[in-house]
C-alpha cells in the first residue's frame, strides 16, 4: 500500500538500479527506508496522496476576516478552518495580484521572474515566462488531476501563457485582473479610449453562455469538480475567487441585493456591499468543505485559504476593504499590503494550533510538494515549512523581500525587523480602513452563533475535528492586532533617499522608525537587499497595445499577440 504514496519515479529508479548495480541498490534501500520513516514520522503517510484545495481570495484585507477579531464582517467558515487546523499569524505575500500569483505558482519571488510591479493588464503582451515550471505541472507529474477555477492573471496575451498549457487540466474563470461580477467584462483605457471585452473563459473558449453572480459561478464549478472527481487519482483544485476585488470603475462593488440586506448593521454603504462580497466568499469556503466531507475525502485533503495581497481601501480598484490597524494598502510594502489572512487545514488532527512563525507565499510550492511526499526542486526561493507548521516549531522562514522596480520601492524583513526603502505612493502608505468604515449600527450579529451555524463547523464536527469555544476565543484574541496610540505626525515615510526601520513584532503597525537607533542593522539589511536586487529581472514597461482591443475579436479579450 505504501507504494502508492511514493512517486512513480522511485519505482522506475528502483528497477533501473536493480539492473545496474547491487551495491547502489542497497544505498537506494537505505534512502527508501529513510523517506518512508520520514513520511511516517511526519504523518503524511497515507494510502493515497492527499488532495489539495488551495483557495485564494483577492484583495481581502487583514481586518476583513473575523478570526482576526472583527465582529463587523463575519467569516465563520474561513475561521473554522483556522480553528480546526492551523491559523497562520504571520502569513506574508507580495503586495499585488500578479506578483503574488506568480510567486505562488513558481515558488520564486516575483522580482526573480520579472513579474513584480504594477499588475498585468489585458492589453499587455507579457506573461509568466514559460521556462518556469509551476505547481500544477509538478502535481501533474505526480498523477494529480489539476483544476483552476477563477482568476489566472499571470499572462493571457499568447496561447502559451494560458493555464491549460501550463499544467491545468481544466480552467473556468477570468484570465485578467478582474471582471464585472455579472457581465464578466473587463474595461481598459487604450490610448484614451475606454474599451471593453468579455474576459471569462471555459477552457480557452469565451464563456458567453453563463449567467449569475461570479462568486456563485466559481463556487458551483468547484463543487461540481469535487463531486465528479474520480478518487483513483489525487485532486489539485485551485479556487481563485475574484471576491472581494473591485470591478470596473463604473460599478466597483457588486453583490446580490439579498446578501447586502443581511449586512444592514454595517454603517458605511460601500463597506456594506463589500461585506456581502466577503460573505459570498466565506459561504463558498463552507460549501467546499461540505462537498469534501460529503464525498468522504475531507479527511484526505489539505485545504489552504489565503488572500493574495492586502485590501485596496482607496485609490485604483478601491474595494473598501480594511487592513486596519496595519499600515498601508495593496501596492505598498507596509504590513497592510503584505501581512494577510492565512489558514492551512490538514487531515492531521495534531496539526491544530495557532502558528506564530513566518510563512511566505513562495513557501507553498515546496510545502505542499513536501506534504504529498514529492521531491523538492532546488532552484526556488520557497522553503518547505511543512514540518515547522505541523509540529509547531520555529519557522525556517527568516527573511522576506518585496522588491518593485516599477514603483521604485524595496523592503526586507529579517527576523523581527523590517527595512523599507524608496518611493511608496503616500496614499498607499497611510492608515486607512479604520474609523467610520468599521462602525456598526445597533448590535453586530452573534459571532459564536454564526460559527455554529456554518457549514464548515458542521462538516468538521462530522469528522470529529472541533475544539472548544475557549480555544477559538484565545486564537481570536491573540490574532487581534492592537496598536493603542498611532501618532500620525511621527510616521516615517520612505523616499528615494529616506528609509525606515521597524520592529514588526513589537510594533506591528509600523509607527516607530528605529533606523537612527540601529545603524549597524540598517547597514547589514541594506547590504542583503542590494545583494538580492542583483537577481532582479526588470518588469518590462507597461505598454498597452492597441492591437489588443476586444473590438477586433468579437468583443473578447484574447491572445492577441498570437495574431500580430
Ligand atoms: C475518511 O473517512 C471515510 C468515511 O467518512 C472513511 O471511509 C475513510 O477510511 C477515512 N480515511 C482516512 C484516511 O481516514
Ligand atoms: C460573438 O459574440 C456574441 C455575443 O456578442 C456571441 O453570442 C457569439 O457566440 C460570439 N461568436 C463567436 C464566434 O465567438
Image: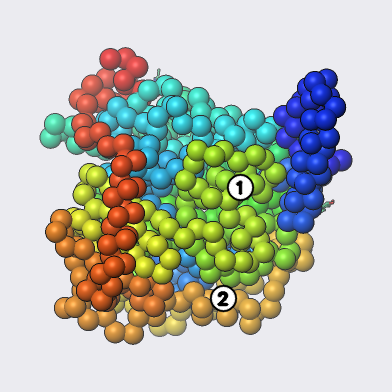
Residue 185 left/right relative to 290: left
Q: Nearer the viewer, mark 1 or mark 2?
A: 1
First in sequence, mark 1 or 2: give its number. 1
Residue 545 left/right relative to 479: left
Tell me the CA gap for discs 1 and 2: 24 Å
**How is the protein colored in the picture?**
rainbow
The answer to which of 208 and 12 lies nearer the viewer is 12
The residue pinned by badge 2 equals 475
Where is 217 relative to 78, above or below? above
Q: Quadrant of the C terminus?
A: top left
Residue 234, image x, y percentages: 71, 39
- Numbered label tally: 2
Q: Residue furthest top?
A: 563
Q: Quadrant of residue 327 in the image?
A: bottom left
Ligand 1 within 8 Å of disc 1? The answer is no
Residue 188, image x, y percentages: 24, 37
Q: Quadrant of residue 236 in the image?
A: top right
Q: Quadrant of the N terminus?
A: top right
Q: Secondary structure at mark 2?
A: helix
Mark 2, other Cα within 10 Å: few <14 / some 14–19 / many ≥20: many
Q: Secondary structure at mark 1?
A: helix
Residue 465, image x, y percentages: 73, 66
Residue positioned 37% across, 23% down in the render = 158
Residue positioned 60% across, 76% down in the render = 472
Residue positioned 64% across, 47% down in the render = 370
User: What is the number of the mark on residue 95?
Assistant: none
The answer to which of 72 and 535 lies nearer the viewer is 535
Mark 1, other Cα within 10 Å: few <14 / some 14–19 / many ≥20: many
Residue positioned 28% across, 73% down in the render = 518
The residue pinned by badge 1 equals 368
Amino acid at each position: 500500500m505504501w507504494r502508492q504514496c511514493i512517486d512513480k519515479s522511485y519505482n522506475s529508479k528502483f528497477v533501473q538500479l536493480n539492473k545496474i548495480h547491487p551495491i547502489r541498490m542497497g544505498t537506494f534501500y537505505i534512502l527508501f527506508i529513510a523517506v518512508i520513516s520520514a513520511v511516517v514520522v511526519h504523518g503524511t503517510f497515507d494510502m493515497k496522496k492527499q488532495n489539495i484545495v488551495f483557495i485564494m481570495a483577492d484583495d481581502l484585507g487583514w481586518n476583513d476576516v473575523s478570526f482576526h477579531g472583527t465582529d463587523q464582517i463575519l467569516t465563520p467558515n474561513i475561521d473554522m478552518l483556522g480553528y480546526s487546523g492551523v491559523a497562520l499569524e504571520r502569513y506574508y505575500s507580495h503586495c499585488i495580484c500578479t506578483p503574488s500569483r506568480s510567486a505562488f505558482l513558481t515558488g520564486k519571488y516575483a522580482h526573480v521572474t520579472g513579474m513584480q510591479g504594477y499588475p498585468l493588464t489585458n492589453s499587455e503582451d507579457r506573461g509568466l515566462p514559460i521556462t518556469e515550471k509551476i505547481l500544477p505541472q509538478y502535481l501533474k507529474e505526480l498523477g494529480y488531476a489539476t483544476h483552476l477555477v477563477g482568476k489566472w492573471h499571470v499572462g493571457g496575451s499568447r496561447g502559451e501563457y494560458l493555464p491549460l498549457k501550463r499544467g491545468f487540466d481544466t480552467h473556468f474563470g477570468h484570465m485578467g485582473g478582474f471582471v464585472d461580477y455579472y457581465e464578466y467584462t473587463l474595461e481598459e483605457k487604450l490610448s484614451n479610449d475606454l474599451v471593453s471585452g468579455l474576459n471569462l473563459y471555459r477552457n480557452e473558449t469565451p464563456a458567453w453562455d453563463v449567467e449569475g453572480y461570479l462568486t456563485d459561478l466559481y463556487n458551483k464549478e468547484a463543487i461540481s469538480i469535487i463531486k465528479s472527481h474520480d478518487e483513483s487519482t489525487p485532486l489539485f483544485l485551485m479556487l481563485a475567487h475574484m471576491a472581494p476585488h473591485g470591478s470596473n470603475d463604473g460599478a466597483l462593488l457588486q453583490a446580490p441585493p439579498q446578501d447586502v440586506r443581511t449586512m444592514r448593521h454595517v454603517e458605511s454603504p460601500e463597506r456594506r456591499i463589500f461585506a456581502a462580497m466577503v460573505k459570498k466568499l466565506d459561504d463558498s469556503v463552507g460549501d467546499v468543505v461540505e462537498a469534501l466531507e460529503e464525498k468522504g475525502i475531507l479527511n484526505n485533503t489539505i485545504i489552504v485559504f489565503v488572500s493574495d495581497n492586502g485590501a485596496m481601501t482607496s485609490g485604483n480598484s478601491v474595494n473598501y476593504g480594511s487592513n486596519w490597524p496595519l499600515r498601508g494598502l495593496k501596492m505598498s510594502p507596509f504590513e497592510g499590503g503584505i501581512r494577510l489572512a492565512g489558514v492551512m487545514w490538514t487531515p492531521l488532527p495534531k496539526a491544530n494550533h495557532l502558528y506564530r512563525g513566518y510563512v511566505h507565499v513562495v513557501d507553498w510550492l515546496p510545502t505542499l510538494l513536501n506534504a504529498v511526499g514529492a521531491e523538492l526542486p532546488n532552484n526556488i526561493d520557497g522553503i518547505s515549512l511543512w514540518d515547522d507548521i505541523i509540529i509547531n516549531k520555529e519557522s525556517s522562514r527568516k527573511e522576506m523581500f518585496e522588491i518593485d522596480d516599477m514603483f521604485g520601492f524595496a523592503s526586507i524583513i529579517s527576523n523581527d525587523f523590517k527595512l523599507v526603502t524608496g518611493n511608496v505612493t503616500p496614499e498607499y502608505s497611510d492608515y486607512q480602513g479604520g474609523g467610520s468604515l468599521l462602525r456598526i449600527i445597533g448590535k453586530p450579529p452573534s459571532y459564536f452563533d454564526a460559527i455554529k451555524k456554518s457549514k464548515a463547523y458542521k462538516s468538521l464536527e462530522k469528522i470529529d475535528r472541533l475544539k472548544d469555544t475557549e480555544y477559538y476565543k484565545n486564537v481570536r484574541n491573540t490574532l487581534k492586532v492592537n496598536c493603542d496610540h498611532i501618532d500620525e505626525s511621527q510616521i516615517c515615510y520612505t523616499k528615494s533617499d529616506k528609509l525606515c526601520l521597524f520592529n514588526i513584532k513589537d510594533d506591528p503597525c509600523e509607527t516607530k522608525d528605529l533606523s537612527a537607533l540601529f545603524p549597524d542593522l540598517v547597514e547589514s539589511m541594506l547590504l542583503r537587499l542590494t545583494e538580492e536586487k542583483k537577481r532582479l529581472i526588470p518588469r518590462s514597461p507597461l505598454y498597452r497595445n492597441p492591437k489588443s482591443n476586444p473590438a477586433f475579436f468579437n468583443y473578447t479579450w484574447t491572445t492577441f499577440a498570437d495574431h500580430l
